[in-house]
Image (cartoon, rainbow, N blue to C red):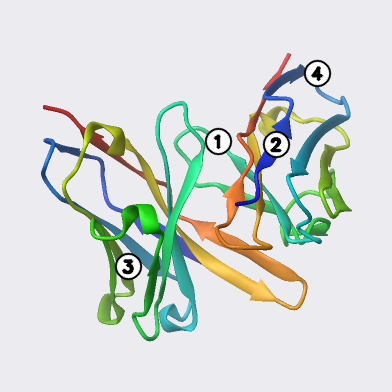
Amino acid sequence: QVQLEQSGAEVKKPGASVKVSCKASGFTFTDYYMHWVRQAPGQGREWMGWINLHSGDTFIVQSFQGRVTMTRDTSISTAYLELRSLRSDDTAFYYCARDQTNIRGNWWDPWGQGTLVTVSS
Amino acid sequence: DIQMTQSPSSLSASVGDRVTITCRASRTTGTYLNWYQQKPGKAPKVLIFAASSLQSGVPSRFSGSGSGTDFTLTISSLQPEDSATYFCQQTSSSPPTFGQGTKVVIK
């Protein structure tokens, strides 16, 4: 079964860092790109960037550059999102999602179940 | 960035009703438009990709149509298990952007 399993909820203080994991199963990990997106309470979904799971190359949205690192460990089919210098407005659900592309289009499937990161003093 | 305007933000309908959700893009996305379903605490699930292609395993009561800037998700006969939030996504140009979501409640 193709699925992505994310790590559990985190509570962090402002200024701290958090690392969210996304473990893949049921498919060849290195054949794909992985996206990260977040959704703050009452807000829309915000794309953070992608990682090429084969090469490790990343694209990070400008607003997150310098604070976000995307990595992967191919030996355990797991992708990671690290967010540093946390602020209260980083409180959100964070999702990983596998990129799917063919001649008809581009979509994301599957998604992880989401990891709630709460930033509070 | 392409802005995606989804409507309505919520709706209440009865089992068996035909339900329509719309998504309008601020500029053309061709057919690079996807629809997802999300239930509370669960992972989003793709229903329709490329505007009108039904994802494998998704019931045929779900359908998508449109191209360019105007798109529609239709549930032909609403079922109790369709209670969820539905959102659209454009992947025509970077950054990918999303509609705000439509919460579907069963009366």
Query: Disc 1 vs disc 2: which is toward the camera?
Result: 2
User: Mark 4 belongs to which amino acid?
Assistant: Ser
Instruction: Give me the C-alpha separation between circle 3 and circle 4.
Output: 41 Å
Q: Residues within 10 Å of mark 2 (few under 14, many from 20)?
A: some
User: Farthest top residue?
Assistant: B107
Instruction: Give me the C-alpha separation between circle 1 and circle 3.
Output: 24 Å
Residue A78 is marked as none
In this figure, which residue is indicated by the disc labeled 4? B14
Q: Is residue A1 visible?
A: no
Q: Give SS at disc 3.
A: strand
User: Mark 3 belongs to which amino acid?
Assistant: Ala
Where's residue A101, x and y in %? 64, 74
Q: Give SS at disc 1.
A: loop
In this figure, which residue is indicated by the disc labeled 2? B5
Query: Pointer 2 indicates a residue of which chain?
Result: B
Residue at horizontal 37 percent and vertical 79 percent from the top: A57
Query: Disc 3 vs disc 2: which is toward the camera?
Result: 2
In this figure, which residue is indicated by the disc labeled 1? B39
Query: Disc 2 vs disc 4: which is toward the camera?
Result: 2
Where's residue A26, x and y in %? 47, 72
Q: Give SS at disc 2.
A: strand
Query: Disc 3 vs disc 4: which is toward the camera?
Result: 3
In this figure, which residue is indicated by the disc labeled 3? A79
User: Mark 2 belongs to which amino acid?
Assistant: Thr
Where's residue A81, x and y in %? 29, 59
